[in-house]
Image: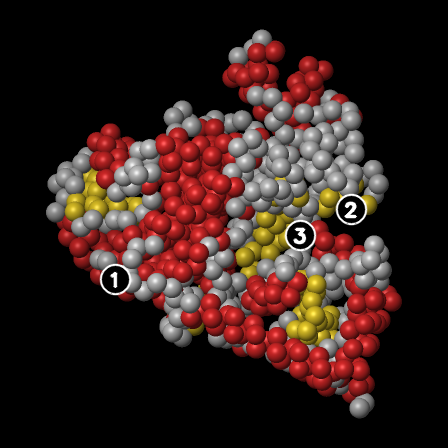
């Protein structure tokens, strides 16, 4: 065959891609293809009769960078790959469907998986060998990447039919396994499983609780916000007795440990990906957007439960970090991540944590601090000349941080104030000044790479937390003031406005009207998005829009959420077995079959978020189609909720919400009026699961027309209660309380209503 005439020419095709991760690999000597629905690389592989090498990673992945430097920039390895394979590079955040599909194979055959993900497959896209990171050369009994690809090429050349037969068998087994999970609809006797699942999940988490250091499991410690949020919900259902208090205290203690450790950037306010040790001290330094809203929401819930502004200040710090470091100054959306690695100016090499770690000399070089301030700074943040990364044997196993310090809160503000014989307020003000000086000095260093890809799902998360924080934080008493990195801004004027900005950006840039449907797209960098959204993009965007509607009363947000829910149902719903597929039929056409994910990990499963959305939409519209769909979806995973609730904490919460009466708070009046705003603040000040807030200005014709068309019952209730404004109506279990007009009375009614549906002591 004359390969010189084929479309497959020897070139790297990543230079024109939008994904920053793919563009990073454009200079590689490897002839990379991007994954496109035109199947170009697979057509080339068939023509050339070669296996396909698929490499999946993401822009801020540390080991992806390592393998790129060691292998993908290696001329010898590249030459061998180009001669024997067709190579495809995928950004897992841009194509989560491709990542999830082949990760199923990796996990099934390797017992686990991670990134970079390396998969070898036939030209028919059927995998036959996979792994994660490979070193370039053989070492410590482990084959190097060149050895691996040489052996695979030899096997393909000599035993191709055996390889293809094995790949066929593997694909059939995978498909059977997926089908079995889809058909495993569990118990159909109608018995409520939500409370049981939530309580079982909470009990398992308490068994794993590290009472000394915080967290729910051993190191490395990944914050999994939905775990902590499920404990808060379970504690609420048991708040009359000891078990509820135990759940709440375990979660609050963990949140304090996380905030005091190096897991939290003590100068910037954001949270790193995870802690490598058991004490939340030395993190893996990358910062992912999707972590920030979820962690901030957990601290916001802690504030609602305790009224302790310590937790609201941490929440504010995360939101302020997001606006300072992750917001696109041009488009207004939020970028995906900041890298763990950056240039170390001492060695002039890329090094993990170089931007975040400190030596005593670097602190002493901050001339803006007096000698006493520098000493206080070192005491408070645990900075020593020897370095502080030896507090645990797990903190620095490879001795990468010798002589350096990861900032953490080594002493309390109160203790340091007592040592200095000043008030706590004065000490806090001094620490704020120190943090700002260190922050400014750090910003003169080379910054970590930022993945400037804007992802719909993660921006939906951001919209959700900004909307909630914009109203919940109005109940701070006293209001949190400036204490760097917390800016002390007005929640309504800044955070709620930011949620509005995200919604406007997403509607303008990430959505299109196609055949009378609102279609959401996955990601954006600078050009018109081309990759259609996945079910998590829809579920989180809908969630954010519902929360923004509740926080503002602006019905355009609810209208858009309803349109997107219609699209999500049309594109992703599994009519036969219920639940939502990850991809729609158009996006998944290049894969063998569609997947449904039910694992609530670092990002909760799309179906878990969608279940709560449907419950909220049913309460807002009285449309029982939404309620039935939520029930069907929860029922479809009921056996797994019973067997492995710890794998599905977000779905456990949705199942519980689906069982308990929905609390509906209808607020009638005009925003900006002090008495009305006080009712809004009170309605949001309490932690109440399964609560919907509807704000209605009866003088707004467009609003009343929307409610007459969408939920006439709500419109009639408003029309009957316009004589005395503002008014609050609290309804639950088909019953409404008497109208109230004052914030303290509303607080009392909400407390009684919420307490009525908790679990009796057992």
**In the depicted structure, whether residue 134 falls above or below residue 205:** below
What residue sits right under mark 1 in the picture? 624
As helix, strand or loop, the secondary structure at mark 3 comes to loop
In primary-sequence order, the first of circles 2 and 3 is 3
Q: Seen in the image, is 536 located left or right of residue 561?
A: right
User: Callout 3 environment at 10 Å: few (<14), some (14 to 19), or many (20+)?
Assistant: many
Q: Nearer the viewer, residue 210 or 521?
A: 210
User: Separation of disc 2 and disc 3 at Cα?
Assistant: 13 Å
What residue sits right under mark 3 in the picture? 60
Circles 2, 1 touching at the beta carbon (< 8 Å): no
Residue sitting farthest toward the bottom: 1
Place of residue 607 in the rendered image (x, y in percent of width and height, measured from the top left): 43, 60
Residue sitting farthest toward the top: 421
User: Separation of disc 1 and disc 3 at Cα?
Assistant: 43 Å
* Image-quadrant location for residue 435: top right
As helix, strand or loop, the secondary structure at mark 2 comes to strand
In primary-sequence order, the first of circles 2 and 1 is 2
Count of numbered labels shown in the rendering = 3
Q: Which numbered tag is attached to residue 350?
A: 2
Place of residue 443 in the rendered image (x, y in percent of width and height, measured from the top left): 69, 36
Q: Seen in the image, is 625 located left or right of residue 601?
A: left
Place of residue 591 in the rendered image (x, y in percent of width and height, measured from the top left): 57, 75
Place of residue 81 in the rendered image (x, y in percent of width and height, measured from the top left): 80, 72
At 56% from the left edge and 48% from the top edge, which residue is drawn? 289
**In the depicted structure, whether residue 277 falls above or below residue 373:** below
At 36% from the left edge and 32% from the top edge, which residue is drawn? 242
């Amino acid at each position: 065959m004359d390969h010189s005439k084929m479309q497959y020419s020897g070139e790297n095709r990543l230079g024109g891609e939008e994904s920053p991760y793919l563009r990073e690999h454009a200079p590689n000597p490897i002839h990379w293809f991007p994954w496109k629905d035109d199947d170009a690389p697979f057509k080339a592989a068939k023509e050339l009769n070669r296996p396909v090498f698929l490499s999946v990673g993401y822009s801020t992945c540390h080991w992806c960078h390592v393998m790129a430097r060691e292998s993908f920039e290696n001329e010898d390895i590249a030459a061998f790959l180009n001669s024997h394979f067709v190579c495809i590079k995928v950004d897992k955040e841009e194509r989560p469907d491709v990542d999830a599909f082949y990760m199923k194979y990796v996990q099934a055959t390797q017992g686990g998986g991670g990134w970079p993900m390396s998969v070898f497959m036939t030209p028919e896209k059927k995998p036959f060998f996979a792994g994660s990171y490979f070193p370039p050369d053989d070492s410590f009994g482990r084959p190097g990447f060149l050895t691996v690809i040489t052996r695979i090429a030899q096997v393909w050349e000599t035993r191709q039919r055996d390889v293809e037969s094995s790949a066929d068998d593997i694909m059939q087994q995978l498909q059977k396994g997926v089908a079995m999970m889809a058909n495993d609809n569990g118990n159909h006797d109608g018995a409520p499983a939500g409370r049981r699942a939530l309580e079982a999940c909470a009990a398992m988490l308490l068994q794993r609780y590290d009472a000394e250091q915080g967290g729910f499991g051993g190191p490395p410690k990944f914050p999994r916000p939905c775990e902590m949020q499920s404990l808060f919900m379970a504690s609420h259902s048991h708040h009359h007795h000891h078990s509820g208090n135990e759940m709440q205290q375990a979660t609050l203690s963990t949140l304090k440990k996380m905030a005091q450790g190096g897991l939290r950037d003590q100068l910037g306010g954001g949270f790193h990906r995870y802690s490598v040790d058991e004490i939340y001290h030395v993190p893996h330094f990358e910062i992912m957007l999707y972590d920030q809203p979820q962690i901030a929401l957990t601290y916001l819930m802690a504030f609602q439960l305790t009224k302790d502004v310590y937790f609201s200040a941490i929440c504010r710090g995360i939101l302020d970090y997001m606006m300072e470091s992750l917001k696109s100054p041009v488009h207004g959306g939020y970028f995906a991540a900041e890298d763990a690695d950056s240039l170390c100016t001492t060695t002039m090499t890329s090094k993990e944590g170089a931007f975040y770690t400190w030596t005593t000399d670097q602190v002493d070089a901050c001339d803006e601090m007096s000698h006493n301030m520098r000493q206080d700074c070192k005491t408070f943040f645990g900075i020593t000349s020897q370095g502080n990364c030896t507090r645990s044997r797990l903190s620095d196993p490879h001795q990468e941080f010798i002589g350096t310090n990861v900032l953490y809160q080594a002493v309390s503000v109160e203790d340091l104030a007592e040592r200095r014989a000043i008030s706590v307020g004065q000490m806090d003000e001094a620490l704020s000044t120190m943090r700002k000086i260190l922050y400014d000095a750090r910003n003169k260093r080379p910054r970590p790479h930022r993945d400037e890809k804007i992802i719909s799902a993660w921006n939906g998360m951001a919209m959700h937390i900004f909307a909630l924080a914009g109203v919940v934080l109005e109940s701070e008493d006293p209001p949190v003031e400036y204490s760097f990195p917390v800016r002390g801004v007005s929640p309504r004027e800044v955070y709620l406005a930011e949620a509005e900005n995200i919604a406007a950006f997403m509607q303008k840039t990430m959505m299109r009207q196609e055949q009378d449907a609102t279609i959401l797209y996955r990601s954006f960098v600078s050009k018109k998005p081309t990759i259609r959204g996945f079910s998590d993009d829809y579920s989180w965007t809908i969630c954010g829009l519902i929360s923004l509607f509740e926080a503002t009363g602006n019905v355009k947000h609810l209208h858009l959420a309803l349109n997107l829910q219609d699209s999500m149902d049309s594109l992703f719903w599994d009519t036969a077995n219920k639940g939502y597929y990850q991809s729609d039929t158009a996006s998944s056409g290049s894969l063998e079959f569609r997947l449904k994910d039910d694992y609530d990990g670092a990002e909760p499963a799309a179906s878990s978020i969608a279940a709560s959305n449907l419950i909220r939409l049913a309460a807002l519209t009285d449309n029982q189609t939404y309620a039935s769909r939520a029930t069907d979806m929860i029922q479809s995973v009921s056996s797994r909720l019973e067997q492995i609730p710890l794998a599905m904490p977000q779905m456990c919460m949705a199942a519980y919400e689906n069982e308990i009466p929905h609390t509906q708070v209808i607020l009638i009046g005009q925003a900006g009026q002090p008495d009305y705003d006080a009712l809004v603040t009170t309605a949001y000040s309490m932690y109440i699961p399964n609560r919907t807030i509807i704000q209605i200005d009866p003088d707004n014709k467009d609003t009343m027309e929307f409610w007459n068309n969408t939920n006439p019952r709500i419109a009639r209730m408003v029309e009957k209660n316009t004589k005395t404004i503002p008014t609050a109506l609290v309804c639950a279990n088909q019953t409404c309380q008497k109208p109230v007009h004052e914030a303290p009375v509303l607080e009392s009614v909400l407390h009684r209503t919420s307490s009525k549906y908790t679990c009796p002591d057992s």
